[in-house]
Image (cartoon, grey):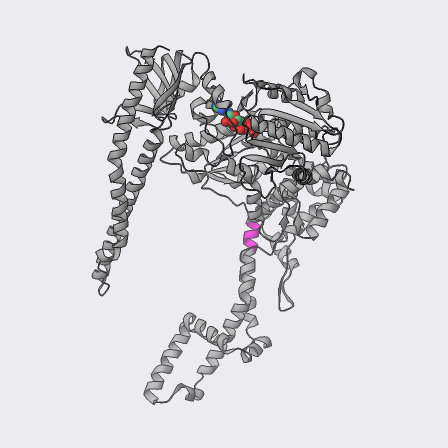
Amino acid sequence: MEAKEWRTEQERLDQVREKLKARIDELEPVVTGLRDQAAEIRRRFWEEVTVNTSTDEDFEETFYTIKQQAAVLSERERRHRHMTQQWRSLNRLLPSPYFGRIDFLEDGLNLSEQIYIGVSSFLDEDGLSFLVYDWRTPIASLYYDYSPGPASYVTPVGQITGTMELKRQYQIHNGQIRNMFDASVTIGDELLQQMLSKGADSQMKSIVSTIQKEQNAIIRNDNSRLLIVQGAAGSGKTSAALQRVAYLLYKHRDSLKADQIVLFSPNPIFNSYVSSVLPELGEENMQQTTLQEYLDYWLGSSLSLEDPFDQIEFVLTAQSTPNYEARLQGIKYKASESFLRALQNYAQWLGREGMLFKGIRFRDRDLITAEQMRSQFYSYNPSLRLANRVDLLQKWLLKELSLLERKERTASWVEEELNYLESEQYAEVFGLLHKDKEVFDIAEHYAVVREKITNKSREDEGDFDFAEREQKLLSEAIVKMSFKPLRQSVRKLSFIDIQGVYAQLFGDEAAYRERTDEDEIPVLWAEICKQTKGKLDRFELCYEDATPYLYIKELIEGVRTNTEIRHVVVDEGQDYSTFQYEYLKKLFPRARMTVLGDFGQAIFTQETKLQESDSPLVRLYGEDETSLIRLVRSYRSTREIVEFTKVLLSDESEIVPFERGGPKPLLTRLEGGEKRDARIWKDIAALKAKGFDSIAIITKTAAESRIAFESLQMQGSEALQLITKETVTFEKGVMVIPIYLAKGVEFDAVLIYEASSQAYGRENDRKLLYTACTRAMHQLLLYTTGDWTPFVQALPANLYEEATY
Ligand SMILES: Nc1ncnc2c1ncn2[C@@H]1O[C@H](COP(=O)(O)OP(=O)(O)OP(=O)(O)O)[C@@H](O)[C@H]1O
């Protein structure tokens, strides 16, 4: 670019920065002033109001002065927050106020406008001209969607068409333009190249300056109830999802708050990995959670729930244990649409018969039996839903308990209890009585007056029936207290035997067929039943049972919902079952959903295809309310790694590498583990010398990770981290990690610890190996001490190098 052009741009940049600085200087005292004012108001709050409650008028006046004072305080605090936000965003702009520019000539006008785009907007002193446009403004979408030429964008009042005359990108550091490119076809291949060749980080970065057109479509899609993104490994699904959250928060800033958005992450490490993107963009973080956390919460403490990592560890390591096949079949079946239908039919059946209740017992007696509850339950109108009938039954039980409680007052145990009442208990009951019973107040009042008139102390009042009255009231109170836990447990619906209802489903095949109308019953059904019931008997629940269990529980007890949440984002969406989607849909009835995933990385046994039109996911809200976007370009890894992993997955996989070169994946075969470990340390030293500081040794399972970690530690003196399911954050460095915990994250270099046919021999292992290899950004190394896995053996030799030593 011409020197003159550089000069002009640098001058403009200097001017913008001057204005930014001036505005920051202007704002600083305002921010501090407001903060001090608010603190002062808070400190002197009570000095400013005279509290006087002697008359009604005084009371009213006091009330209004407090209210007024509180209003002044909250206005000051609001302004302080607002100003601080502005001040922060100006400070964020200062080192690099913008990253792009477009010159747009709107049809019908004769002068084109220069639009500079940055992470937030900045207006000139006139308050009208934008010196910088926020990347989320409608006009900024031109930058992501078009190359120079005819272009258009959509505003709330319609479409604007025109011609883009220039598209320019900048790299600005501390107020200096380091680089400038005029883009022609796609935006910023040069800039993107530079971004992608940087090292991996322990925190994900925002991609705001290099968002690609297809990613922009995800970010700005704001009309479908469900947005599904199927994208190859490294295609920027997570990045786009986070930018999308920032976009939604900007577009709907008057109505949408960050805590009304929830992101479901595959694991806690991932949670921490993505947590800095929104703050980097000046937005508050959305809520982040894992499905496990939700399930645990709703299941409560009555059952202990297996986590998904233990489930996958079992699937990967327990092949030789008896009944492995049955568990596998069970996991698949319990995640299926057939099972969902079966449960819906089962609920219908329960509407006619078969509900199980737990009788209410009191002092070793049956107060209300399960049988009584059952006949009461089935006496209600059969057209009522289960949950409504449960509601009626609950009311009936509370009423019955009141009647029984009344009867109980004359029981002999009550009198005995009265005699043994400790003095504190007595005082407690007495206090209660005193508070509760109006009648007692009158009696008490009478006693006090009587005391005064007769000049006799209360102890002498034996002739009066006050004591008798007191005894009666005390008995009432004692029974009431003993019945309190019963009433509480009825309110908590503990009278429904959910565990029994779920266990009952796993009866013999004929019974199951009859109760559920199901005909696709797994072959090993009997064994599945035995396993499920065995677990329940021990008050345990396998991960695959958690959502079905909650589903049936909610069909019976009524659905729990969270109506606050407006957007649910599910990352690694291929790993959720149909069931889990149904559950999320019910749980968040007012939310739109964004699901991002890659079926090529479906490594858990419960999986959902994302893109087929007959996918259960598409049926969740129906085709009309669902949009599907595919991402095929992979940005994370070098071309060589993408080509290797693409063929590893299968021939049909649609993955296009981004043109960034690097060494081919390196295969190293060694005789025995000791030699392999020694070699790994050597390779790590070489990688570090190249400047890579985020290196992962990926194993198939957690069990293998532990062994690898110990054996590597014996051979090397370098720091090594072992990542387990308990790890919440990770630092840069060298780490050993099982594949399923490395989901969604990336490393400069990946070393596959043992890529033998023994480790990755079954078809199911293909996606595991693919997921592991696609974590690598710059270099991929595979090791084996035996035969290469058939997936590697099948690769054309030109896709890799073989180590010679
Ligand atoms: N438009 C972009 N500009 C710059 N970097 C990008 C862009 N899109 C993606 N990347 C980078 O590519 C890498 C992969 O992105 P991301 O993790 O979002 O992909 P993903 O599709 O979620 O991957 P996976 O499914 O494999 O976990 C990240 O380092 C991200 O910063």
Percent position of residue 747, x then y: 56, 30
Asked if residue 468 is positioned above or below residue 604 in the image, the reply reads below
Q: Nearer the viewer, residue 640 or 45?
A: 640
Quarter holding the N terminus is top left
Locate residue 675 relative to residue 222 in the image: left or right: right
Q: Which quadrant of the structure image shows residue 47? A: bottom left
Q: Which quadrant of the structure image shows residue 231? A: top right
Percent position of residue 420, x then y: 55, 79
Q: Nearer the viewer, residue 78 or 560?
A: 78
Viewer can see residue 775: no
Viewer can see residue 265: yes
Locate residue 628 relative to residue 445 in the image: left or right: right
Quarter holding the C terminus is top right
Locate residue 437 relative to residue 748 in the image: left or right: left
How many marks are shown on the rendered structure? Answer: 0
Secondary structure that dominates the magenta span: helix
Q: Nearer the viewer, residue 455 or 270?
A: 270
User: What residue is shown at x 77% (from left), y 37% (from top)?
Assistant: 523
Percent position of residue 581, x then y: 57, 36
Asked if residue 435 is positioned above or below residue 580 in the image, the reply reads below
Q: Nearer the viewer, residue 607 or 224?
A: 607
User: What residue is shown at x 77% (from left), y 43% (from top)?
Assistant: 526
User: What residue is shown at x 25% (from left), y 39% (from top)?
Assistant: 30
Asked if residue 215 is positioned above or below residue 720 in the image, the reply reads above
Locate residue 567 relative to residue 122 in the image: left or right: right
- Extent of the magenta region: 388-393
Percent position of residue 227, x then y: 51, 28
- Is 157 covered by the magenta stretch? no
